Amino acid sequence: MARQRKTYLLLLVAAAVALLVANGTWPHRLGAASVPPRQPLPGAVRTVPAAVHAARLNSGTPCTGNFERHALPYTTTNGRAPIRMFNSNGSGLGVDDLDDDGDEDVVLANLAGPNAILWNEGGLTFRKQSLTHGDSRAVNIVDVDGDGKQDILFSRHTLSPTLWRNLGRGRFVEDALPGVEGKVYATNWADMDADGDLDLVAGAYDAGLEKDLGYNFMFTRSGGGLYLYENRAGQFGYNKLSERAEALALALPDLDGNGQPEIMVGNDFDLSDQTWRRSGVGWSQITPFRKTTHSTMSFDLGDIDNDGVQEVFASDMKPYDQDVRTLAQWRPMMAQMPHQPFKGDRQIMENVLQVRAKDGTYQNEAYDRYVDATGWSWSAKFGDLDRDGFLDLYVVNGMIANDLFHYLPVGELVEQNQALRNDGQAHFKPAPEWGLGSTASGRGMSMADMDNDGDLDIIVNNLGRSAELFENRLCGGLGLLVDLRQSASPNTRAISARLTLHTSAGSFHRDVRVASGYLSGDPSRSHFGIPNGATVHSLDVRWPDGAFTTVKNVLANQLLTVTR
Amino acid sequence: MIGRDRAWTGSFIREVRRDPLVQLLSPREHTRLVLTMSALGLLLWGALTWQVGMPVWGATTMVLGLLLVPGGLKWRADMRQHGVTIMILSVILTMQGFHSVEHLAQWIQYHVLHWQPQRSSGLISAANAEWVHFIWNWGVVGIFALLILRGVRNRWAWLLLGWSVAHTMEHTYMLVRYLQLKQELGLLGVPQISAQGLPGILGRDGLLSTNPTLMQICGRVPGITTISRIDVHFWWNTGETLLLAATAHRFLRGHLTRQ
């Protein structure tokens, strides 16, 4: 009898283990996609001298514990009523100091109305300068010609991108990027061929092009797909990496830590996201992620646990609330456009947070860390909003599309933007007390210190409503801003440089990049939050060519300009 | 070595045959009828689904209807031979067994065939509705309570009752949410949209997964707040089946031996 019991027990345990393993619930990392091991940087560590200029930051307005909303004198308009896909995708924005006066300016793209620059005149007052045309999507602020002045690139839905070349003193002239003919949507910049200048990576939104320009257009030279335009002394060389793309987001991370960026394209609909890595003279596709988002709307990179390795966040569509009223608004739409998985499909319809394990594999931990659901999410970005040393997350959301949401008033899914506070353990909690829950249907979004007081403010380009600036008036912590300059390089703002700030509360990492989130340009100025009571030791700069500079005697509440 | 293995296998099979649970579930004199009906049912199932194009759920229901004939005869024999209580036990064991097959089918559709959760509805997909789950589970709880009242009392029986009540509470919560969602969809003018498939208390996106206190204490508990709805109910039913088998085994061991 005892033997019989033992046999039953053994069979039971074996069956349970088999089910658990097949279920994928345990062990967690079983079957993770293989990714290349982290490579050491080529060659010996090379240190280079750099000049450092420090300026004190403003003292700022008294803190109130939340963000104060300011409506900006600008509205992205659609021109067509009612709004239908894909006009409901709205437009992006960019932030950077365009006139070198020390203040961050804002550039906003528009669909029907003119694009605009909002010149920052200090004290959070802005002067609007309209540019000639709209029909624009992404905004990149980048020194394309290496003359030290930040130019503006707009991607346009059915036309090739347009460049506004910065002539200095606030003057711009419209130009084309020589050799760039693709009708592209999402754009980003980095030195992709390690020749010192900045190259353009651009992805088209094929569904939109097909709708507006017809199916035959897709077979032309400039029809659809993913492009790498290599900068050859100002002329851009054409390299089509993929024939198809539904690119809403592009990121250029250094996933394997070898100092060379990979290309990540975030595709909408059933087309899976793709990751490309340089191999020899060409590019090959790799699959570093076991799970990816289905309708990828944006990418951001950030070291959320301060371990020196960047995590990758991608936003998708999933209701942030499971109450029946919210679900009732989503259900009919989801019935219209269900995710139809195919063999080998890695896509899930929720946000993903790719966390790199010690063995080099990436694991999606969005659900475990409470960032899987932020609504119909567009731009999502990390930033240390509360200056506690840990990156928080802000996501703008909402959707207006009469063909999808015909059962809702004016076809609009009204959602609150989601602010998620990092609890210090790299888990996130909603922070409604910050007052960032705008319901104005945000699309593009960027973070920058707009009043030079050491904290991150937020600018949102909404669809059909005034753009918004959220002035950071949270209490606690100090800030440090860092501008990098390379006087002898065409990459004058040191795009792809890595910054590490060493403090008594740990080391914090940032990278300099042109764009992230959804269609949104990032400032080249990096921001660090420094927790209360922490002292700053030094700042390490890893320049784009791999050389290092260490800045000592760094003080908080400063704007450092490090010039190589 | 091979001889020892054979001897062990032989003795294992003899012991399994002597097991009271196996004895009860054995069709005994109806074995031939059960096998014939099963073979006929399988042929019919194949013909109806592949040749006639009948939906899987319809064909499966017909096959189950066929198997009811030998089932009914066997349960009548159980009642004559062992009395009402053991006959109820025999019926509920068989039905719970088929119910578990249905959940296993869903599990395979979802995890092995990688179907969408909505599509992974098992073999009798038409029965995969909140109302059916709700009625079925309360019915099962009623039968377990009745068995206890009729003397099937052992620690496994009490555990089984507790487990099935907890399972049924989850289905009650899901039915309430289902009805609320139906109402909301009606208010939006889209009553034809399905409200089926909402998460319950446990599992991914369930009530516990968004509980602020749990969030504070331990975050998302692997399994309890992370597995899919299909897995949640697969495990609920696996637990229920195992506890039922243990309850019956314990009860029958004494009872059938006495008889």
Image (cartoon, grey):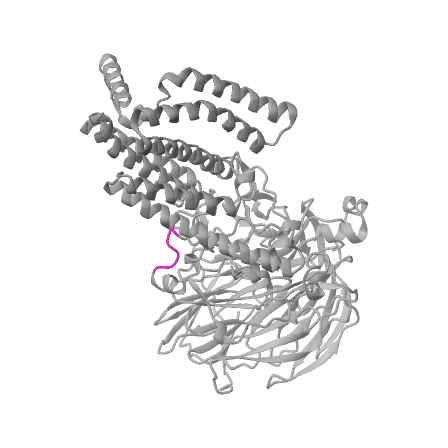
Q: Residue at x 49, y 52 (%)?
A: B175
From the image, which quarter does the N terminus of chain A lie in?
A: top left
Determine the image quadrant of residue A484: bottom right
B15 relative to A263 in the view: left or right: left
Residue A525 in picture, x, y percent from top left: 55, 72
Residue A401: x, y in percent? 70, 60
* Predominant secondary structure, magenta span: loop
Q: Nearer the viewer, residue A351 or A115?
A: A351
Q: Is residue B220 magenta?
A: yes
> Foreground residue, A33 or B101?
B101
Residue A116 in sight here? yes
| Front residue of this view, candidates A209 and A449 | A209
The spot of residue B92 in percent (x, y) is 38, 35
* Residue A369 in view here: no
Is A197 placed above or below A481 here? Answer: above
Residue placed at 53% from the left, 40% from the top? B127
- Residue extending farthest top: B3
Q: Is residue A304 magenta?
A: no
* Residue A441 falls left or right of residue B134: right
**Does B94 appear above or below A373?**
above
**Range of magenta residues:** B218-224
Q: Position of residue A396 (x, y in %)?
A: 59, 66
Relative vertical location of residue B128 with respect to residue A62 in this rendering, above or below: above
Of B219 and A281, which appears nearest the observer? B219
- In the displayed structure, does residue A552 sit left or right of residue A380? left
Q: How many marks?
A: 0
